[in-house]
Image (cartoon, helix red, strand yellow):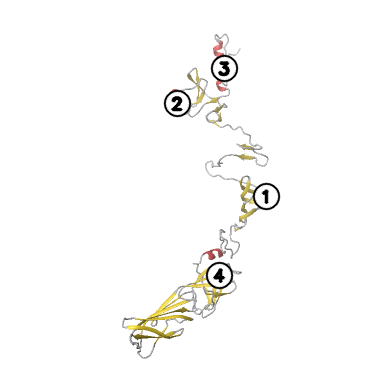
Amino acid sequence: MPTLPEISARLAMPYIQPAQAQKHVTHNEALRLLDVVVQLSLVSRALSVPPLIAQNGSCYLVPAGAGGDWVGQAGQIALRDADMWDFLTPRAGWLAMVLDEDRLLFFDGTLWRVPDIMPDIIDRLGIQTSADATNRLAVAGDASLFTHDGSDHQMKINKAGGAQTASVLFQSGWSGRAEMGLAGNDDFTIKTSADGTTWLDALRLDAGSGLATGLAVTQDAQDSTVGRLLKVGDSAGLLAASPLLRVPAGGSANALALTSGAGFTGPLPDGLELRFRAGASNTGAATLTLDSAAALPCRTVTGAVLPAGYIRTDTDTVARHENGLWVLSRMHESGMHAQGRFERLENGILRVWALRSTQSDSAPTVWEFPASFAVLDHVSATAQGASFHAATISSATVSQCNFDAWTNAGTRADNVDVALSATGTWY
């Protein structure tokens, strides 16, 4: 007859031996071991020293480097029994519930790890929410994390064919507001919606060329819609918003031709501004052509037909398109020569002034204006020096005036300085 072993092969529980005295001791020890390993639960596996108070029957997994009564018991199961610590060696295949982690662990003979208890393929999975036939993976939580396993990480969304959809949908209150991906074709599209029903293609990248279309980019060379991305070649928005943009000027003195690089061909947007330096001053009414658009009449800032010399060659001119006309703005102009000083403003105002001396005590002195008027409004003269009574203007035209200085006795005086000024318009 074979010899009966003293312990069981799997759990090392003691067997009752033939003719053994106090059989209850052996039996109770076996029951004690079963009480531990059956439905094994661990209070914790994170304590490095035994707890000060531990209930009998409680178990702990002893970590590496543990101290106190657990010294040298790393990897053992510490059982509190009869107010003492007993240690059990786990065996491969044991399952244990770690209570402070709310986690089920599996011992593989070396390490405790999460068991692979799920099948390779499952019909659906819901994490803190219910999955259904459409949403077979459903997750409810503040965030979801997908990370690498040592190197890269790539997420794949695959569709059956070109006419199907592979996209990511963003919702608010279960109503769609934005979608990006391959929606019904192979172009990458970003869509938006204000109500979940009507959708707009904000941006579409062509699968073949990579070029962009959609409402978020300019639609043509004349598009100056605020908020749209500017495509190469569509620079109207930039031109309309940048009055300092300087463009080349060609053509002739009275038929200017500007080249913007935007390729304008049709009706021009109001508010479009360009800065240019003319090669020749206009001699009268003028037109301006931008790219291939139609030639349009030029006007002053007051709406008048351009006078000769309005377009200057020594400084830039700003052209602004308004209602089929080019309104030209010119820099303030001033000058000085032997006849005095002048100041021309773009609104047509002309001011001239000088300090001249009377040349005769028998006839008026002529002052030729440093710049001629189109319309003369006012001329004034003031004699300099206390010994003279007055200075007067006897006659005036758009290009000159006659003036005199008079003594207190009422006689004409020679060699008297007179301050002269005149105002009017130059166009």
Quarter containing the N terminus:
top right
> Is mark 3 in CB contact (under 8 Å) with mark 4?
no
Q: Residue at x 39, y 84 (%)?
A: 392
Q: Label 3 amino acid?
A: Leu
Which residue is label 3 attached to? 31
The disc, 3 or 2, on the residue closer to the chain's N-terminal end is 3
Kind of residue at disc 2:
Val
Tell me which corner region of the image, top left, top right, bottom left or bottom right, holds residue 394. Answer: bottom left
Disc 3 versus disc 4: distance between alpha carbons? 100 Å
Asked if disc 1 and disc 2 are in contact, CB closer than 8 Å, the reply is no
Within 10 angstroms of label 2, few (less than 14), some, or many (20 or more) residues? Answer: some
- Front residue (pair 405, 410): 410
Towards the viewer: 410 or 159: 410
Of 89 and 393, the residue lying toward us:
393
Residue 27 image position (x, y, % from top left): 57, 14
Q: Sequence order check: which comes first, mark 3 or mark 1?
A: 3
Cα distance, mark 2 to mark 4?
85 Å
Q: Name the residue under label 1.
A: 164
Q: Are marks 2 and 4 in contact (CB under 8 Å)?
A: no
Residue 131, compared with residue 204, is above or below; it is above
Query: Of all residues shown, which one is farthest toward the left?
Result: 387
Instruction: Give the CA distance from mark 3 to mark 2.
Output: 28 Å
Going from N to C along the chain, the mark reached first, 1 or 2, is 2
Mark toward the start of the polypeptide (4 vs 1) = 1
Label disc, if present, on residue 49 of the rendered structure = 2
